[in-house]
Amino acid sequence: MAKKRAAEPDEVKLKKKIAAKRTNHSNPEGDAALRSLKKRLKREQRKRRALAQRKKRAAGSKASATPASA
């Protein structure tokens, strides 16, 4: 069986966790846990953007190749 998709994307969860940690913290720059959450968020954003870029390039090459072959 396939895995069920999360009801809430990882990016949204991470943003909420970061916001919660940042509000009740005196020194957010010195917090290693907060830093790792930020790194995970950036990784997720990079993945999403890379996927979008790949899809865009794939669609663009197919769209431009179709009229030329016809």
Image (cartoon, helix red, strand yellow):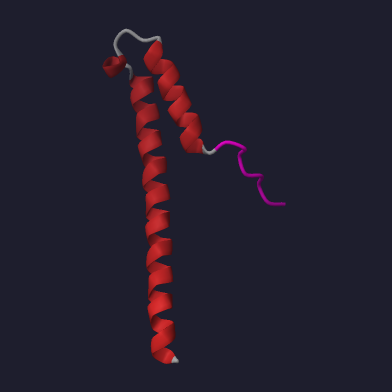
**Front in this rendered view, residue 53 or 4:** 53
Estimate the x, y position of residue 1 in percent, counting from the top left.
72, 52
Q: Residue at x 42, y 48 (%)?
A: 48
Q: How many marks?
A: 0
For residue 2, side relative to residue 42 (left or right): right
Residue 47 on image: x %, y %: 40, 48
Check the image and name the residue furthest to the right: 1
Compared to residue 70, the image places residue 59 above or below, namely above
In the image, is residue 24 above or below residue 65? above
Residue depicted at 42% across the width and 42% down the height: 44
| Res. 56 image quadrant | bottom left
**Residue 45: % across, % down:** 39, 43
Q: Which is nearer the eye, 70 or 9?
A: 70
Q: Which range of residues does the magenta coloring cover?
A: 1-8
Q: Quadrant of residue 8?
A: top right
List x then y, in percent, for residue 67: 42, 86
Q: Is residue 3 left or right of residue 24?
A: right
At a point 43% along the width and 62% down the height, the residue shown is 55
Q: Find the residue positioned furthest to the bottom.
A: 70
Q: Is 16 rendered above or below residue 63?
A: above
* Magenta stretch secondary structure, dominant: loop
Which residue is rendered at x = 45% and y = 92% of the image? 70
